[in-house]
Image: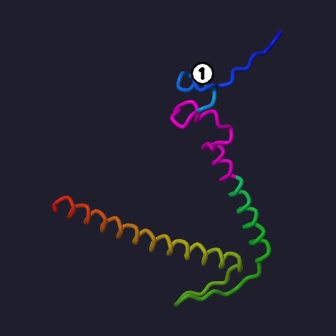
Amino acid sequence: MSTQSHEPTAGDRGTGTDPTPTPTDTGSSRHEDPLRGSRTSGLWVAVIASIVVLVLLVVFIMQNTERVTVAFLPWEAELPQAAALLIAAAAGMLLAGIVGSMRILQLRRRVKREVKVNRKG
């Protein structure tokens, strides 16, 4: 029994007998890559990252349980230090998100205006 292996030659190019994908190949070569990321693998990465963040958050809360007094303008409250810090962080993220969204809307309006002017001119 002899096994024959077919080595591609110059005559095989373009005839479809070459088993190696060429840059012009589209379609099935996308599914052949076993290391290609998928939505499922991305979801698993997000789940694992969320679990790590959650564990770190629980440790942070457990280590910062002493009560502190927080005063803001006319309001004053006594709450755990971890809660005060998390509320401050969430408020900062919310404020940054609002400012960032306003800037994005401003830029979109400017681009629409410029596209409109360029179509007329």
Q: Residue furthest top?
A: 1
Q: Which residues are magenta?
A: 22-47
Name the spot of residue 107 as percent of width and height, x first.
Answer: 36, 68
Residue 101 placement (x, y as % from top left): 43, 68
Q: Nearer the viewer, residue 112 or 79?
A: 112
Is 38 within the magenta? yes
Tell me which residue sits at (58%, 36%) in the image: 30
Q: Residue furthest left?
A: 120
Quadrant location of the N terminus in the rendered image = top right
Q: Position of residue 9 (x, y in %)?
A: 63, 25
Amino acid type of disc 1? Answer: Thr
Q: Residue at 63% across / 30% down in the picture?
A: 20
Q: Residue at x 67, y 75 (%)?
A: 83
* Residue 46 in the image: above or below residue 15: below
Q: Quadrant of the C terminus?
A: bottom left
In reply to whether residue 117 is colored magenta, the answer given is no
The residue closer to the viewer here, 65 or 108, is 108
Above or below 95: residue 23: above
Secondary structure of the residue carrying tag 1 is: loop
